[in-house]
Amino acid sequence: MFDPALSLIEFSSIAVGIQAADAMVKRAPIEVIQAGTVQPGKYLVLIGGLTADVEESLAAGRQVGGAAIVDIVYLPQVHRELVQALQGGRVSDPHDALGVVETSSVAAAIQAADAGIKAAEVRLVEVRLADGLGGKGIVLFSGLVADVEIAVDRGVAALDRPDQLVRQVVIPQLHEELWANLSQATRFREIVTA
């Protein structure tokens, strides 16, 4: 759906975010646009399509967004599994290890997820963005310990600034009961009410 390019702009102002989204769709024919509010009062604009069109739309978003831009990610060759994860897909077949990258922004989580999944033989258990996280992002990788370590390290290395990383963790041989929980959801309310 997003092949070959994807971009997300994270705005601190909802009004500016809507204005920028409008400018973005008017600048170039993009195949996909998803826009809306997330906690804590941010506005996200996610676009996908042909590389040149996404670049043009991104330029319009940057121009209108100005100082209201919190973070940006641009992926000219986005990994298909990341697209599926952003659409709510989950990998429920746990492996040996779990890797977690926790970021201070949504864009940084997407950047880390794409870099990690491209660097090693891992799966994306989940990519969770903003809501219920105070605006942060989390990426969960599963696979063999060595591969998960590579994915987490590459994901962190792909971040633009050190302040985008909240924490990184690799847990070898995660307990099967915790795998069962993580395979369902990471939101406590969803697990309790299931």
Image (cartoon, helix red, strand yellow):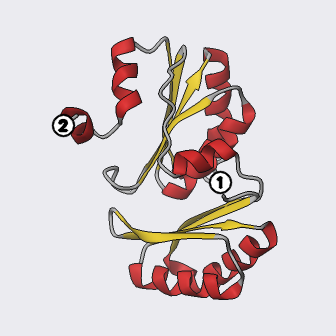
Is residue 59 placed above or below 148 in the rendered structure? below
* Residue of label 1: 160
For label 1, the SS is loop
Image position of 193 (left or right of 25): left
Q: Residue at left 33%, top 62%?
A: 39
Percent of width and height locating residue 121: 70, 26
Q: Residue furthest right?
A: 52
Image position of 71 (left or right of 74): left
Percent of width and height locating residue 133: 34, 50
* Residue of label 2: 193
Image position of 86 (left or right of 82): left
Percent of width and height locating residue 56: 74, 79
Q: Residue at left 43%, top 73%?
A: 12
Is residue 47 placed above or below 163 in the rendered structure? below
Percent of width and height locating residue 129: 44, 52
* Viewer-closest of 52 and 41: 52
Q: Residue at left 48%, top 71%?
A: 35
Q: Are marks 2 and 1 in contact (CB under 8 Å)?
A: no
* Amino acid type, callout 1: Asp
Residue 43 can be seen in this image: no
- State which quarter of the image contains the N terminus: bottom right
- State which quarter of the image contains the C terminus: top left
Q: Say the numbered circle drawn on residue 83.
A: none
* Viewer-closest of 190 and 112: 190
For label 2, the SS is loop
* Amino acid type, callout 2: Thr
Q: Place residue 186 in its image quadrant.
A: top left
Is residue 89 placed above or below 10 in the rendered structure? above
